[in-house]
Amino acid sequence: MSSFKSLNLQPSILKALDSKGYKKPTPIQEMSIPHLLEGGDILGIAQTGTGKTAAFSLPILHNLSSKKVKTKAARMRCLILTPTRELASQIEDNIKLYGKGLGISSAVIFGGVSSRPQIMKLSKGTDIIIATPGRLLDLMGEGHVLFEQIETFVLDEADRMLDMGFINDVKKVIAKLPKKRQTLLFSATMPQDIAELSKSLLVNPKRVEVTPESTTVEKIDQKINFVERANKPGLLKSILKDKKINHVLVFTRTKHGANRVVQHLEREDISSAAIHGNKSQGARERALNGFRDGKLRVLVATDIAARGIDVSSITHVINYNLPDDPKSYVHRIGRTARAGREGIAISFCDPTERKLLKDIEKCINYQIPVDETHEYHGVPAEIREEKKLRNPNLTKKAKSSNNNRRRNSSKNQRPRSKKKS
Ligand code: AMP
C-alpha cells in the first residue's frame, strides 16, 4: 500500500490529509489518483464509504491549482454532478478541507433553497461547481451557467441518478459539455443504462472496482430479527434501551413511515429526527447536523435521503422495513462501518417481507444470521404495546407458548447455513 506522499500530491493537500488523520490512501484512492493526475478518464465502481470523494477531489484540486486559469463569469473549470443536496454539501465540505490554502473556489448548486446567492456566486466564475441536476438545468436555461471552460466533469452516484429519475436531466447537462475534457463516472452498481451512458461518456477509461457489485461490507455484523409488523415499534424501543447504542440510522420504506417512527421514539423520550424528500432543506440540514453532533441519537431516513449521509460514527443501522430493491440493502448497511470502522446492521422482517429477505440474501450471497434472542421473537401480533405495558408478563407468556408451538412444528423452520464464500 502506497502513502499519499508517493502519489505526488501538492504539499498543502498532504498537510490537509494529515490533519484529517488519514494515514494512507484507501484502495480506490490508490488506484485512481495516479491515473487522474495524468488526465485520464475513470469508471469507478464503488460504494460510498470507500473514500471515493477524496479519490476524485484530491487529483482535481492538485491539477486545478497546478495550472491556475482565471474563470470567467458563469464558467467553471470542474463540474461535479451528484444526486442529492446533502451529498453536494458534503463533497464541497471535503473539497474545502482538502484544498485549504490552494486558492481554489467552489460553490454548490441545488434546489430547495433560493437561487439568488447561487447566481451571485456563479456570476464571479468558480473553479469547482458541485450541483444537483435539476437546479443546474434551471440556471443553465436562464443563462447563469456556461460550460466552455470545463476541464473535468464528474458524474457521481450515477446509478442513484437513474433510480431517482434524474437520468434525462443528466443527459441534458452532458449534451452541453465541451468534447475535450476529463471525465469521471462513479456508480455503486452498473445497471445497463449506466453501462451504456459510460460508454458514450468516457474515453479509454481506467476501470476501478473496489467492492464487487452486491457484496456486503464485510466488517458489518448483520442480523435478522423476525417480528410481527405491529410489534416493530416495540422492538425498536427495546433495542434502544441499550444506551450504548447511541448513533443509530433507521431506515423506513416511506416518508410517512419515517415520521411515524419518530413519533414513537419521541413518546419514549428518545431524541430523533426524520430526513426525507418532504422535509425542507433547512429541516434536513438541522436533522443531519444534530445527528452528526451527537444531539440526536436516532436519525430515521428513507433510501433516497440516505445516499447523502456521511456520518462516520454511525454504530448501528436498523432496517425497520426491508428495502424492495436488494441492492439498497447493501447501500443502507454501508452507512455504518465507514472508513474501516466496524458496524452493526439489524433488519426487521415481518411475515410479508420474507420474500424481500430471500432476494437480499440471494443478492449478497449470504444467509443473514437470525437473532432469536430479541424480546419479540415469536411474539404474535395481537400482543400490542399497550397490553404489554399493563401486563409485562404477557410478552413472556406469549413468547414461551409460541416457542412450544415452534418446537412442535420444526418443518416450518428455515434451514440456516454458514456464510457462503
Ligand atoms: P466516501 O466514500 O468518499 O463517502 O468516504 C467515506 C469516509 O471515509 C469519509 O468519512 C472520509 O472522510 C473517509 N476517508 C476518505 N479517505 C480516507 C483515508 N484515506 N483514510 C481514512 N479515512 C478516509
Image (cartoon, helix red, strand yellow):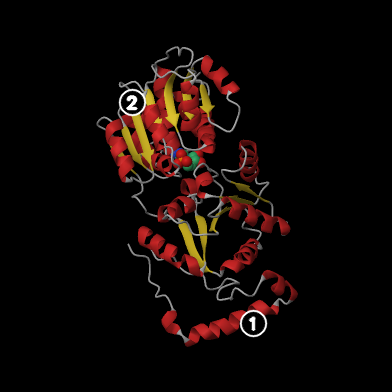
- Residue at horizontal 45 percent and vertical 50 percent from the top: 331
- Residue at horizontal 64 percent and vertical 82 percent from the top: 397
**On the image, which quarter does residue 411 sit in?**
bottom left
Image quadrant for the N terminus?
top left
**Residue behind mark 2:** 182
Q: Whole-percent x and y of residue 166?
A: 43, 37
The answer to whether residue 302 is left or right of residue 197 is: right
Task: State whether label 1 is within 8 Å of ligand 1.
Answer: no
The answer to which of 253 and 378 lies nearer the viewer is 253
Q: Is residue 55 visible?
A: yes
Q: Whole-percent x and y of residue 63?
A: 39, 22
Give SS at disc 2: strand
Q: Whole-percent x and y of residue 68?
A: 42, 14
- Residue at the farthest right position: 390
**Residue behind mark 1:** 397
Which is more N-terminal, label 2 or label 1?
Answer: 2
The answer to which of 144 and 97 lies nearer the viewer is 144
The kind of residue on which mark 1 rests is: Lys
Q: CA distance from mark 1 to mark 2?
A: 66 Å
Could you tell me if the residues under marks 1 and 2 are in contact, i.e. CB atoms within 8 Å?
no
Give SS at disc 1: helix
